[in-house]
Image: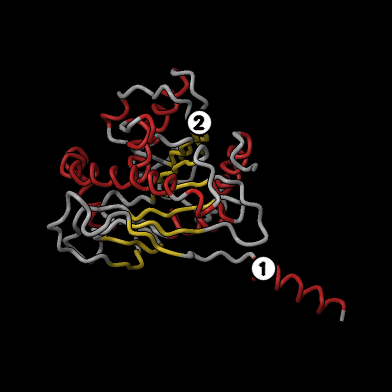
Amino acid sequence: MKNKITFLFAFLLLVGTTVKAQETIKLYQGKAPGSENWTQKEAEMYSDLFKTEVVYNVTDPTLIVYQVPKGIKNTGTAIVIAPGGGFQSLSINREGKELAEILSKKGITAFVLKYRLNKTETNDPAREMMDKLKDRAAFEKNSLATIQLAAQDGKNALNYVRANASKYGIDTKKVGIIGFSAGSTVAMETVLDNKPEQLPDFVANIYGGPRPELLSVPAPDKKIPMFVCAASDDQLKLAPRSIQMYNKWLDAGQTVELHMYSKGGHGFGTGKQNLPVDSWETRFEEWLSLEGFLTK
């Protein structure tokens, strides 16, 4: 009987802290500026290449909100999560929703950003992106207009969070952004090409490949702690750009932490490979705590 009661209590506790997205917020009223004539339809599929769900053909940027569950202390911290996918798709679960659930249980209000993407010409956006990356220079050049729109989505996401801080119990001085791969370009655009009053309060760059032009932009005067994480065996060979961003922050006297794993590849996100890289989320939580973002 005692075991049954214990099991029932544990089950109720688990149910009480289960996290689900409470709402989806449109970032713009009407059609998003700059893409008013886009006609592609947003869709979602399971990618055999990425081994996870991806969203593609995003034309109407949104934020998926994960509030702090009842019974867990709200730290007042908020984070915008920008998934990656080469501006061709979004790894919406492994680099978005799953992390949002983890962080919300730590007392952080999380917002998964679905930003605008290149139009997908096939029914397999992940493989289409990999094919285009055979000529990376041309791909980055052709994607620049979309990157600029996605960057605007990232900035507007931060603006929305701060403007609605009281609704979610957020401290307007504890609003950050984390980006994975292409999403890190979105995140770094909000840091390196933004108005001073709209800068985030912290940033995380996960196996990021910020466009080369950003690497030459000076770090802002505002102190913005940065967390950098990647794997040396990144198939897209983006690890050096993570090192460059780390050095930029270090040279500017900014607070920065770097985790470069020997193995893990590109796009590990919240997936598990039975490798040390699987614990990067714990390192990130420790860093957030060290920087004061996990305390009220």
At label 1, the amino acid type is Leu
| Image position of 127 with respect to 178: above or below | below
Residue of label 1: 14
Q: Which of 93/31 is in front?
A: 31
Q: CA distance from mark 2 to mark 1?
A: 33 Å
| Image position of 52 with respect to 252: above or below | below
Q: How was this image coloured?
A: secondary structure
Look at 26% across and 59% down and name the residue there.
Answer: 60
Q: Position of residue 221 (x, y in %)?
A: 42, 21
* Crowding at mark 1 (Cα within 10 Å: few <14, some 14-19, many 20+): few
Residue of label 2: 225
Q: Position of residue 162 (x, y in %)?
A: 44, 44
At label 2, the amino acid type is Pro
Look at 37% across and 59% down and name the residue there.
Answer: 25
Residue, far bottom: 1
Q: Position of residue 195 (x, y in %)?
A: 33, 31
Q: Which image quarter holds the N terminus? A: bottom right
Look at 30% across and 30% down and name the residue there.
Answer: 214
Q: Which of 267/250 is in front?
A: 250
| Image position of 272 with respect to 235: above or below | below
Sequence-first disc among 2 and 1: 1
Q: Which of 82/181 is in front?
A: 82
Q: Which image quarter holds the C terminus? A: top right
Q: In the rendered image, which quarter is residue 200 located in? A: top left
Look at 51% across and 37% down and name the residue there.
Answer: 173
